[in-house]
């Protein structure tokens, strides 16, 4: 029993040190025509993202949430109006990039200008991505896993994320190397073109000046 608790403790320590934290708490001001306030997190393609938003109380205010990404198409994964208390939202990303959780706090009803200036709601946001978004407790109950087996399953998910991250960095490095090589070739070609152009211009100037001096009888 003592021997099994030590590796479990070490696995737990490794697990919590490897998982990043994506929790934030902020004040969202209310306006008649509010702009979006977005919180961005990096995520790979086909990655599970769980968004948990706790909205504080506030009269004459409607909080809307929208989950988008930073791709050129700006994919809208989910849009929900009038969220209250705790809302749990789940999406699966379509492309590499950043996922944004965007909030708007709209004033509703007849509110004076002075009162509107004081309206706001507290947003407590928690974003879980990848292995951190998987409910391992539910998996453990479903598959009757022990505590150590559950920790191993968590570590397996983390290792897969690290492997995917390294593969992504490898692809980026290959793309950057290709871009760098093509840029060097273009610069080299431009340098040769400039050199031959200057040489040709110099030769043309010599013949032009020689012909000019001959017309003026300055040289034979």
Image (cartoon, rainbow, N blue to C red):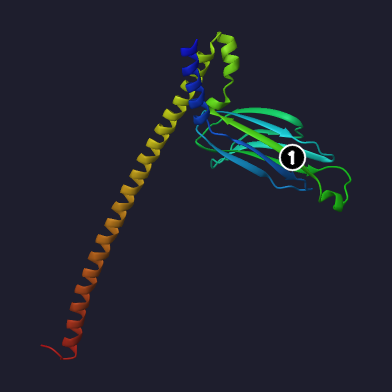
Residue sitting at x 44%, y 29%:
162
The answer to which of 8 and 204 lies nearer the viewer is 8
As helix, strand or loop, the secondary structure at mark 1 comes to strand
Q: Quadrant of residue 125?
A: top right
Residue 139 image offset from top left, x and y in percent = 57, 14
- Left or right: residue 119 versus residue 52 is right
- Left or right: residue 119 versus residue 47 is right
Give the vertical position of 180 relative to 94 (above or below): below
Residue sitting at x 40%, y 37%:
169
Q: Residue furthest left?
A: 220
The answer to which of 89 and 163 lies nearer the viewer is 163
Badge 1: residue crowd in 10 Å (few <14, some 14–19, many ≥20)? some
Count of picture labels: 1
Q: Which residue is mark 1?
A: 122
- Quarter of the image with the C terminus is bottom left
Residue sitting at x 61%, y 33%:
127
Residue 196 image offset from top left, x and y in percent = 22, 65
Residue 45 image offset from top left, x and y in percent = 50, 31
- Left or right: residue 44 versus residue 171 is right
Residue 93 image offset from top left, x and y in percent = 55, 31
Residue sitting at x 66%, y 28%:
89
Q: Residue furthest bottom?
A: 217
Q: Quadrant of residue 51?
A: top right
């Amino acid at each position: 029993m003592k021997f099994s608790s030590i590796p479990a403790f070490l696995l737990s320590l490794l697990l919590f040190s490897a998982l990043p934290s994506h929790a934030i708490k902020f004040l969202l001001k209310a306006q008649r025509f509010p702009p979006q306030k977005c919180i961005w997190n990096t995520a790979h393609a086909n990655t599970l993202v769980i968004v948990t938003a706790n909205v504080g109380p506030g009269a004459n205010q409607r909080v809307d949430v929208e989950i988008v990404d930073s791709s050129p198409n700006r994919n809208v994964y989910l849009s929900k109006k009038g969220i209250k208390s705790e809302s749990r939202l789940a999406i699966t990303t379509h492309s590499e990039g950043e996922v944004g959780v965007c909030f708007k706090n709209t004033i509703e009803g007849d509110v004076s200008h002075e009162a509107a200036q004081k309206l706001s709601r507290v947003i407590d946001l928690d974003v879980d991505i990848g292995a951190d978004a998987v409910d391992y407790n539910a998996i453990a109950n479903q598959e009757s896993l022990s505590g150590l087996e559950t920790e191993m399953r968590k570590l397996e998910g983390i290792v897969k994320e690290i492997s995917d991250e390294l593969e992504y960095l490898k692809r980026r490095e290959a793309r950057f190397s290709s871009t760098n090589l093509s840029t060097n070739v273009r610069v080299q070609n431009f340098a040769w073109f400039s050199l031959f152009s200057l040489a040709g211009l110099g030769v043309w100037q010599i013949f032009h000046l020689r012909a000019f001096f001959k017309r003026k009888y300055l040289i034979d």
